[in-house]
Amino acid sequence: MRALDEQSGAGHEPYSTLAELLRQRAIPRGPVLVLTDDPRRSSADWPSEYTLARPGEATTLLARADFQAVAVSIGSAADPDDPGALLDMLGASLPADAVLAFIRPRRGGSGERQAAHSMLRRSGFDRIWVETRGRSLCATARRASSSGTRTCSIIVPVYNERETFPILMRALLAKRLDHLGLEREIIVVESNSTDGTRDLVAGFTGAADVTVLWQDRPRGKGHAVRRGLQAATGDIVLIQDADLEYDLEDYDALLQPLLLQDQVDFVLGSRHTGQARMRQFSDQPLLGDLLNAAHLCFATVINVLYGQSLKDPFTMFKVFRRDCLYGLELECDRFDFDHELLIKLLLKGYVPLEVPVSYCSRSFKQGKKIRMFRDPPTWLRADLRYRLRRLEPRFDEFPPNVSPTDPSRPGTLLALGNRASLGPREGTDTDGPHDDDEPKPRVREKIPHATALER
C-alpha cells in the first residue's frame, strides 16, 4: 500500500483516499481492480498488482480474473447521480467477501450516508462503512455471502425479574415471526440475580430457539446487552426488556419497515404518541412527573446535539439490521448504553424511523431500576462525549492465520456470530452493578466491539 500512496500524488485526493480505504480493510497488494473515469490517470500511476480501467470495462475484466477488491472513483466525467447500476453489477460479479472501496463527490443533504448504506445493501454488500472526507463521500464494504432464511435475534437482559420473566418468556416462545418470513433467536443474558430469577432462567435452557448466557456478577444492563450482541447471529436485532413495560404485539409494526422498506435500517418504538405524561405512577406520581420532565430535557439535548427531531430516543425498543453495528465499538455498561447505541448509529449515518408502541410504565416500588442521582449524569456525559469525539471505524479484518479471538492481536473487537462462549462464563463478567447494587471497584473490560460479521 505504501507504493500506492507514493504514486497517488498530492494533487489527486480521490486516489490517496482510496489507498487509505483499502488499507483500513486490510487489502493485500493484489489483485485489485481500480475503476475510474478520470482521464488523467494511467496504469503507470498504480502498482503493478492493480488493474486500472474505466467503469464500462468492469464487466469484461471481472469475467476474466478474480479480484480480491475493487476500488471505484466516480468524478464529474461520469454520471454521478446514479452509481447504482455499477454497484449492482459489482455485487453480482464479485466473489463473496471481496472488498469494495468507493468514493464520489458529495451531494449534500442529511440522508446522504443513509442512502449510500441502503444502495450498497441492495447491491449485495454488507459490513458497510460510509463516511465523508472533505468534499467526498467514501464507503467500504464486503460482498455478502448468499443467505437463506432471515433471522431476528431477540436479546433479553435479565436481572432480578422473578415476577415478570416467566410471563415474558412464555409470551416470547408463543410469539411467531413466520408470517414475516423470519426465524427467531432468543438470547437471554442472566446477570446473577439474587431473587431467584436465575433458577427460573435455567428452566428455559432447553427451550427451542433459546440461548442462555450466564454472567457471574451483574455489570449493568448495557453490558448484558453487549454480551447478547456478541452472540447474536440474526439479520435483525431486537432488544427486549424483561419487565413487561412493552407489548410484544408491537413486534410486527417494528419489524415490517425493515422488511418492506429499502431505506429503513433502524427503527425506534416510540412511547410518546402525543401525551406528555408517558410515565404515570399511581403510587409515586411526583416521581413519574419528574421522569417525564427529564425525558423531555434529555431528548432535547439529543435533538440539538445531533440534529434530530426524535420524540423518544431512549426507548428500549431498538430494532436494527445487525450489519448496522459493523465497525462500531460499544463500551457503556449501564443505562447510558441506550444513549451510546443511538448516538453511534446516528453518527454512522442511520436515520431512525419512529413507530408508535404501547407502553405500561412501572414505578420504582414496582421494580424500576434507574437510580435518580447516579444514572442521569452518565447519560449527559455520553451525549457530550460522543458529540465531541470523532467516530472512528474499528474494522475486524484478520490475516488468514489470525483468529478473531487471539488475545495477542491489537484492538478490542467483537466477532458477532462467535458462539464459542455462550455457556456459563465463570470469573469473566465480574464488574460493576446492574441496577441498584452498591458500586464496586471497576476494572474496565471492553466487550469487543460490534464488527466481524464474518463467521
Image (tube, helix red, strand yellow):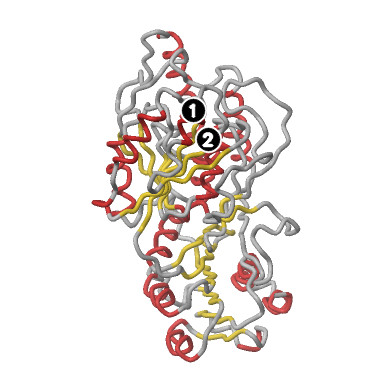
Q: Nearer the viewer, residue 159 or 435?
A: 159
Q: x, y percentage for residue 235?
A: 41, 55
Residue located at (63% from left, 82% from top)? 30
Residue located at (36% from left, 33% from top)? 270
**In the displayed structure image, the side of residue 57 where residue 174 appears, left or right:** left
The answer to which quarter of the image holds residue 451 is: bottom right
Q: Nearer the viewer, residue 412 or 60?
A: 412
Q: Secondary structure at mark 2?
A: strand
Q: x, y percentage for residue 372?
A: 55, 17
Q: Is residue 351 visible?
A: no
Asked if marks 1 and 2 touch (Cβ < 8 Å), the reply is: yes
Residue located at (63% from left, 49% from top)? 448
Q: Which mark is residue 190?
A: 2
**From what the image shows, is residue 46 above or below residue 298?**
below
Identity of the amino acid at label 2? Glu
- In this view, the mark in front (1 or 2): 1
Q: Secondary structure at mark 1?
A: helix
**From what the image shows, is residue 81 above or below residue 118?**
below
What residue would you read off at disc 1? 197
Q: Earlier in the sequence, mark 1 or mark 2?
A: 2
**From what the image shows, is residue 239 above or below residue 450?**
above
**From what the image shows, is residue 17 above or below residue 424?**
below
Q: x, y percentage for residue 116?
A: 44, 60
Mark 2 neighbour density, 10 Å: few (under 14) some (14–19) many (20 or more) = many
Mark 1–mark 2 Cα distance, whole angstroms, equals 8 Å
The answer to which quarter of the image holds residue 371 is: top right
The answer to which quarter of the image holds residue 357 is: top left
